Amino acid sequence: MAPTDVIYLDIAAVVIMAVTLMSMFFRHITKGPANRVYIVAMLLVLITAILCLAGELCDIYLYNLAQDGDATAPPEPNALRDTITVIYYTLRSLTAPAYFILIATISGTTHLLNRSMAIRIAMWIPMLAVVAFILTNPLHHLVYTYEAGAIVQGPLKHVLYFVAAYYAVTGIVWLIHWRIVLSSDEFATLMMLYPLIFVSVFVQHTFPNLHIEMFITSIAMMLVAAFVIRPELNQDTHMKTASLRSYRDMCHRAYATEKPTCLAYLEIVNMEQLQELVGKDELANIISRVSENISRHLQNDDTLFYLRSGQFCIAPRKNDYERALAIAWKAHEEGKAAASRQADRASVPRMRTCIVRIPEDAPDIQTLNAFVRRFSHLVPESTVTTFEELSKKDGFRMAMALSDIVEGAIRNRTFMVYYQPIYCLHDGRFHSAEALVRLKDPELGWVSPSLFIPEAEQNGSIVAIGEILLQKICRFLGSIDYAATGLDYVEVNLSVEQCVRPQMAGELIALMEDYDVAPEHINLEVTETSSTYSQEAIDANIRTLAARGLTFSIDDYGTGYSNTARVLELPFNLVKIDKSFVDEMENPDTRTVLADTIAMMKAIGKSVLIEGVETQEQVDALAAMGADYIQGYFFARPLPEDEFEPFLREHNRMNR
Ligand code: C2E
Ligand code: CA
Ligand code: CA
């Protein structure tokens, strides 16, 4: 039988595989288990294809030799040809198990292969047996033999097909069983591998001169590279880490396949301060350097994911708690070492780090996600903690459930408003009150606004909460008998996130009209804000509402971004001094600052209210300093609607 020209197809196969493989290296898609197994599988088929080609060239060479000597005499079996053939068959028979392992790795199910002895035997024995069978062919000639100088199938060649079919069927069953952890692209591409290869093997078997088997294999592998190994989806090209998407896939797979996993989460604590200090671009550089520093200390199959705004996750190669802890500590220290090149001490990133075990700590993906979402609230900074440790702390359950509780309260509009009466030092009456949100979870009890308001401000749900509260407050204020109660106005908290919305003023005015609330009955409390918010939008709202007749106060004065210029610039008539000053009143320096602040505000025509007053001594001292109003438990606690009016009627009558 003369060799044919179709070896060109094999040359094409080698070229396609080599180029695909090289592109993996050029595009740095070499990390992570799936990429590595793919590269090994690709190398395997590439070498097989090269051997196939070498065998064919060998045949041509031997054939020509035979022709040169005596055209009718067949060449003897040749040691080189024999070696090539044995290795070729061996590697070829490893391809089907390699596909299977590729599927298991891509679906993140390799851990299931080690579950029991039976699975291990079923996995390895057929492969080892067939390899031994091929390697011993020179002794038994059952796989292939020589006939008229050409290689022909031995009587037991079919064993090879059976074993390949065994792995193929197992692979298909595995693929179908775990399709939920694969994207439709991944599933379709991996699934298509098999019919393609079956057809090519069948064609090659039936028409031995049509060398398409390797060519089809190379195309199939290229498709896998194109549709399954997609770096743009799995890599954060900017951070040079695995992407958020691949993190989600990893978590999804870990739960779906019950793979015990240890994850280390790291977060840069001081993102905001860093940005204010060094600017957005330099902050991005700092984050990249944190990422580089962490990566440098990871081993090849440990994966580093960049999640979002300064948050990283490390999935160590093995599920080993001790090792994960060691990695977390190292990463924690390395992260902190990634200071800005501007060599400013304040621009050092600070880290918070925590280890979570799946499934012991977070039995389902909702728990894990809730934890990661509330990471900055739950995990203390500057150390490495574990979920297990944190879960023993009070309030952990509440903190974990917070998002759900708040979401539910928004959906069912179950937020309540309490009113804390404010005492006027000039006439000893309660002219005003502060409206304060209250939230009670049926299971976990009262949820402090100090807990959920900051988070709602961060994730934007404060707008929905504010809308519910304003509606309830306006409805209540529309029903009050101001003359009988002696109430002048109610102070309503407005978060900056609400104030920057251009439509805020219009919506509030519409609400007040709906419930017949006169503008002078509402005073809006605003806090001093960082410069990251649009000052123009806030000012526009304040001016619109002030023009309508609403008044404003500055809340928590002396705690945030103090900006006396804004106190002068905008129409505030009341300054609320934060409770922290009262708490520190024992300190003579604090007393001096307090007295001077009150005097200064009075000098520019503002009224002064002191918050958090709990004792008679504090009241007396503050009265002596010239404060106008006192808000605190000493006079009154925040009261529900139905107790608030009776309180006013009683106390304002007594002192009339
Ligand atoms: P804030 O605006 O400074 O409210 C005053 C806080 O001090 C209230 O806490 C009040 O209950 C508490 N307080 C009043 N007198 C005393 C006292 O004598 N001793 C002590 N220890 N505390 C006193 P609350 O209600 O827990 O609110 C905490 C924070 O949550 C508020 O601080 C405010 O920033 C926010 N918040 C509360 N209600 C709302 C709301 O309706 N909207 C918005 N945006 N934020 C709110
Ligand atoms: Ca307030
Ligand atoms: Ca306050």
Image (spheres, rainbow, N blue to C red):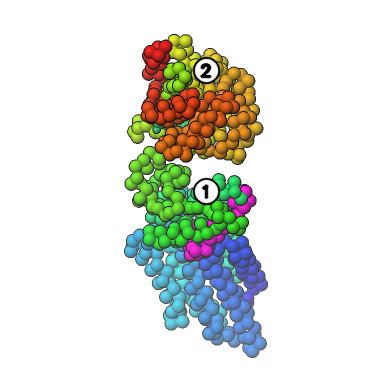
> What residue does disc 1 label?
270
Distance (Cα) linking label 2 and label 1: 40 Å
> What residue does disc 2 label?
521
Mark 1 residue crowding within 10 angstroms, few (<14) / some (14–19) / many (20+):
some
Q: Could you tell me how many numbered marks the image carries?
A: 2
Q: Which badge, 2 or 1, comes first in the chain's sequence?
A: 1
Is the residue 54 above or below the residue 19 in the image? below
Q: Position of residue 577 (x, y in %)?
A: 49, 31
The residue drawn where x is 55% and y is 55% is 345
- Amino acid type assigned to the residue bearing label 2 in the image: His
In this view, the residue in front, 111 or 248, is 248
In this view, the residue in front, 526 or 356, is 526
Is the residue 223 above or below the residue 401 in the image? below
Query: Which image quadrant shows ligand 1?
Result: top left
Mark 2 residue crowding within 10 angstroms, few (<14) / some (14–19) / many (20+):
many
Q: Which segment is the magenta one?
A: 279-304
Is the residue 99 above or below the residue 522 in the image? below
Q: Position of residue 369 (x, y in %)?
A: 45, 45
- Classify mark 1: helix, strand or loop: loop
- Amino acid type assigned to the residue bearing label 1 in the image: Asn
The residue drawn where x is 52% and y is 30% is 598
